[in-house]
Amino acid sequence: MKLRHLSTAAADFEAEFQRVLHWSAETDSAIELRVAEILADVRLRGDAALLDYTARFDHLQAQSVAELELTRDELKAAFDAITPAQREALKAAALRVRSYHERQKQASGLSWSYVDEDGTLLGQKVTPLDRVGIYVPGGKAAYPSSVLMNAIPAQVAGVPEIIMVVPTPRGERNPLVLAAAYIAGVHRVFTLGGAQAVAALAYGTATVPKVDKITGPGNAYVASAKKHVFGQVGIDMIAGPSEILILADGTTPPDWVAMDLFSQAEHDEMAQSILLCPDAEYIALVSAAIDKLLPEMPRRDVIRASLEGRGALILTRSMEEACEISNRIAPEHLEVSSANPQAWEPLLRHAGAIFLGAYTSESLGDYCAGPNHVLPTAGTARFSSPLGVYDFQKRSSLIEVSEAGAQKLGVIAAELAYGEGLQGHARAAEMRLKK
Amino acid sequence: MKLRHLSTAAADFEAEFQRVLHWSAETDSAIELRVAEILADVRLRGDAALLDYTARFDHLQAQSVAELELTRDELKAAFDAITPAQREALKAAALRVRSYHERQKQASGLSWSYVDEDGTLLGQKVTPLDRVGIYVPGGKAAYPSSVLMNAIPAQVAGVPEIIMVVPTPRGERNPLVLAAAYIAGVHRVFTLGGAQAVAALAYGTATVPKVDKITGPGNAYVASAKKHVFGQVGIDMIAGPSEILILADGTTPPDWVAMDLFSQAEHDEMAQSILLCPDAEYIALVSAAIDKLLPEMPRRDVIRASLEGRGALILTRSMEEACEISNRIAPEHLEVSSANPQAWEPLLRHAGAIFLGAYTSESLGDYCAGPNHVLPTAGTARFSSPLGVYDFQKRSSLIEVSEAGAQKLGVIAAELAYGEGLQGHARAAEMRLKK
């Protein structure tokens, strides 16, 4: 395989490195126009527009949107129809994901308050969203694990109504996806997809209830639609291609590292897999393992295209330098494949998820370790976070000023309000002062 | 004043209520096009474009962008030049805002982890953003309090570099704004504004460093620019007109409630002030207080336009019904002007900030009670939160799977991965299984 080999010591490293990282999030303006039309049409015509687009794009005819809703019995039937091993795996994964997100809620998602020396109460009330929508792609990227990763944090947050949409082209349903919805606490499922499904969730129709937030991955139309309705409803981040960065000190079996690179590359041709390592001999071993293992992989064509197009094996001067480069990339998935990963973890400032040690393959985290697999891509880990319970909660400040507190605060507020030319603010504060 | 009086018992209430609430967040497409041009130009030409736009829009000539940076000495001079009372008020407000946000960080912004029964470590690392940009408007809406409310949470989060931009049309500087920057922990200040300032922060230029997130209010050009660069950098919410909703049980002096309605209405003509109360006589008293107090207000023309255009006094059947209507509105500011506010607070699900009891005028919260005054508007409190320390932090999942853990997790992950057709994921998990 013609995999890119770079070295930080090379004169052209910076230019080559920039070329590897380059990825444009620019959206196609033709898609944007088309999406804007679909959104406006669903907003105007509601269910009728949904039926039209579902017939046209998904080749699925229905007399009413109610026909497109799946019953709890249908979900249960899907769950009963998969293999026992699949059922056990889904249940075990759901249990661990739920347990992690319950810890997350305890750690950062509870209301708090305190009373100051004047008897004034200050705090923040944390409440779940009323209703959320989860977009689940159909077709080749139909991942039951994504159903768990989106629905369970919402359920743990306490969202009373979780609505899932999933396209079923020509009526073809993915039993694993429906089984995952069954155990993940999804309340209602509509077999709708595309920009029209996003529009239905954002604006509501006679049949599909309007939600407060939409999460979940989708194609370019779905991404464009989510960006368009942002503000009307909340959305999670718009995801770019998936990425893995592996920092290796040379102590992990090279086959393991090669397979971890594959596990990212197999998603699609735009996925990115990068190895950073200070040991040239080890890089050669990984490179050989890649060539050895590739022919065994059913998705070898995608893996090859991804690795040759966007992958890189980068020789660094040290593990410290590898950590610095990792911070520049701010990867979605960051494996620290080292005998002593805790030594490097404090140096790693930006990453969606950090997988520590040789046993922590990204794939364990993708499915069942517990943390969420919906993670910031394309360097957005610099300023955003994994999907979590916090995405399905919102906060309200609480303030109850005591009479004594109003005397002190009123003087300060009035002074600043007059300084800003807002006399109404000042007078409102002064009225609470004792004469 | 011709203030709208509604009653929930009236037959046409729902239609009238919808008319009051109507506000369109649609942006002007001419502004969007102009903003896209400015962004592209600054991205391409950097400092040169910044100098051109600053000369054209702010009538401020400079030879270099470095000339537009204010030194720490200039900020200190501004702080020294304001009155002692203003200095004390700013310092007192900053102290309280800092104290509240430190509590917030303790309550929801610390790293956490745990070890499961197999010795696998799971957790989340919370880290500050590296560099943030704060937009501060110039001109009539130049609020030093907003400098405190944006910069202090960033500082408490531990952001090492806080860059402020503020336009100074014709070179006119607002000493209170600069004094606030001085005490709020802002690291660098550029006298830049408009879409060009947002572009400089989002893309970076030779002189202005690229930031990871941009917060702070601005006009339609600034809002459009922030929305455009969202994804490239993080942004806070796009703010709509400011709103207050007062739930009154009739026990607060009517003058106080009238002035609290004014304090919102005086912001601008699109600001919204609504009173919900089950006591018709009390509503009449507030209405009389409004007519009595209005002539005294320097900003009476704005207040009248706002109250007549978008305000309403609404008679409800009960306080419970008032709480339900409040939840439908999801107001930015919610005053519970009641003798027993804690009885109603649990019923209030959606609001940016809840001000409890007669002494808690919104203006005390706006300036100095402690909680943030940057709050979700236009019903977005249904899914978003006050600006806070959490906006200047991001989280990374931490996973360190033990050898024993890999044996259990590997079986589950492989089963699910094969089910999704991702053999690389499955093999990566299986390789960690003991033979």
Image: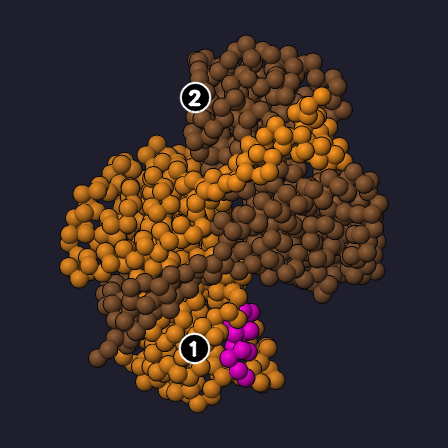
Chain colours: A brown, B orange
Measuring 78% from the left and 38% from the top, which residue is drawn there? Answer: A85
Magenta segment: does it hold B435?
A: no
Using the numbered discs, state the Cα–Cα distance from disc 1 to disc 2 in whole angstroms. Answer: 60 Å
For the C terminus of chain A, the image quarter is bottom left
Frontmost residue, B312 versus A341: A341
Q: Residue at x 57, y 34 (%)?
A: B119
Q: Would you name the residue on which mark 2 appears?
A: A321
The amino acid pointed to by label 2 is Glu
- Residue A110 percent location from the top left of the image: 49, 56
**Residue, far bottom:** B281
Q: SS class of the residue under badge 1?
A: loop
Between B3 and A259, the one lying in front of the other is A259
Q: Quadrant of residue B217?
A: bottom left
Residue with the mark numbered 1: B340
Q: Which residues are magenta?
A: B317-328
| In the displayed structure image, the side of residue B120 where residue A176 appears, left or right | right
Disc assigned to residue B147: none
